[in-house]
Amino acid sequence: MKRRKKISGIAKKHIAQLMIQLADLLEAGCTLSRSLEAIVRQSPDMPAGRLAESLRRDIANGQSMAAAMENAGGVFSTVDISMIRAAEEGGFLPKTLTGLASHMASQADTFKQIKARLAYPAMLAVTVVVSIIFLLGYVVPKFTAVYHQTSQTLPGPTQALLAISDFFEAGWIFILIAVVLIFAAFRAMMRFGRFRLAMDSFVLRLPVYGTTLRCWQMYRFAGTMSLLVNGGVTALQALKLSAGVVGSANVRRDIELIAQSVERGQRISTAMSNSRFFDDTTLEMIFVSETTGRLGNVFARLAAQHHRDFQARVDLMLSLLEPVIIVIMSVIVGLTVTAMLLPVFSMDSLLE
């Protein structure tokens, strides 16, 4: 069947709410089609209601829940669809829907918290940029007209500031074009695997930010693995699917190599030992879980641990970022004002 257009305007939290409602109705004994009808009646004009109607229509036509999700046109990820397909085959759809909803809600809350914490640093950064543009584009040219009328040699800092202001005023279009070209070239280079891996490796090695990003990637990997394994997906298939949700090219490559090793018959813990992203404690926990059959639970614990580490590192990064931006803004404004006022301090010589 041909995919429909993506149903727009659906946030992760709304999809999570739909999954929770659906799980509750199924646990109460309602059929899947009737549960979706109830959700549609409750919010027919809302995005979640339209999504529920799309799912209900496909299921009424004889398709499975996983197939109906696939036909939604990109609303659900490959991981979500694979987990629901395994749950339908295993007969534990309500439990899987609840787990999927919790996972979606957790990620939505994390993104919301990050956006809230970044609001103040972003405002400071915008203030810095606006201040620089205002000083170089408006304030400094006002002084330039006065200084150019004098015959005295201006101080070095003032001459440098005036040169920067003149360049900014006359060549701003070239600066804009250069920025666009650099950005386009960077995007083009990122399509090459080696360059992407090199850039990703560089970012992961950055102090504070690199370790924070690494915690986030490991949280997404462990959380997805827990969700899939507990949802009835095989460990090998879970590894292949989890690699797709990881944003880091290096981490994704390592997970793909682990999946290939497991496919050849290696244990997961043995395959993970060849990666630099898994420490000895993690390897030991995975090794024990493979023998006890609690792989999904161990990945859930690892996901919770990486999530705590990620939040702590975000707090640290933001606590360092705010004073750095303030210092940069203070230095730029201070140097600019000082350079503009240096000739005023020697006004007597300028008026001779």
Image: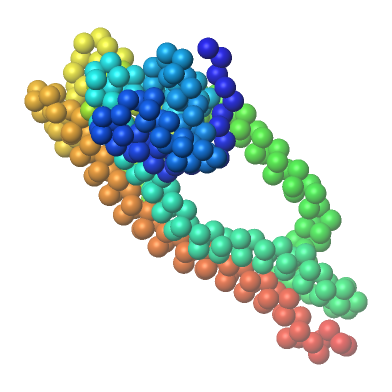
Quarter of the rendering containing residue 232: top left
Residue pictured at 41% horizontal, 30% vertical: 36
Tell me if residue 14 can be seen: yes
- Say if 335 sits above or below 315 in the image: below
* Residue 4 place in picture, x, y as percent: 57, 22
Residue sitting at the far top? 264
Is residue 170 toward the left or the right of residue 101 in the image?
A: right
* Residue 134 place in picture, x, y as percent: 73, 67
Front in this rendered view, residue 305 or 156: 305
- Say if 245 sits above or below 21 in the image: above
Residue sitting at the far bottom? 348
Front in this rendered view, residue 333 or 155: 333
Residue pictured at 48% horizontal, 41% vertical: 43
* Residue 84 place in picture, x, y as percent: 34, 23
* Residue 330 place in picture, x, y as percent: 57, 71
Is residue 18 toward the left or the right of residue 294 in the image?
A: right
Quadrant for the C terminus, please.
Answer: bottom right
Quarter of the rendering containing residue 302: top left
Is residue 101 toward the left or the right of residue 76 in the image?
A: left
Front in this rendered view, residue 103 or 306: 103
Quarter of the rendering containing residue 90: top left
Residue pictured at 55% horizontal, 32% vertical: 7
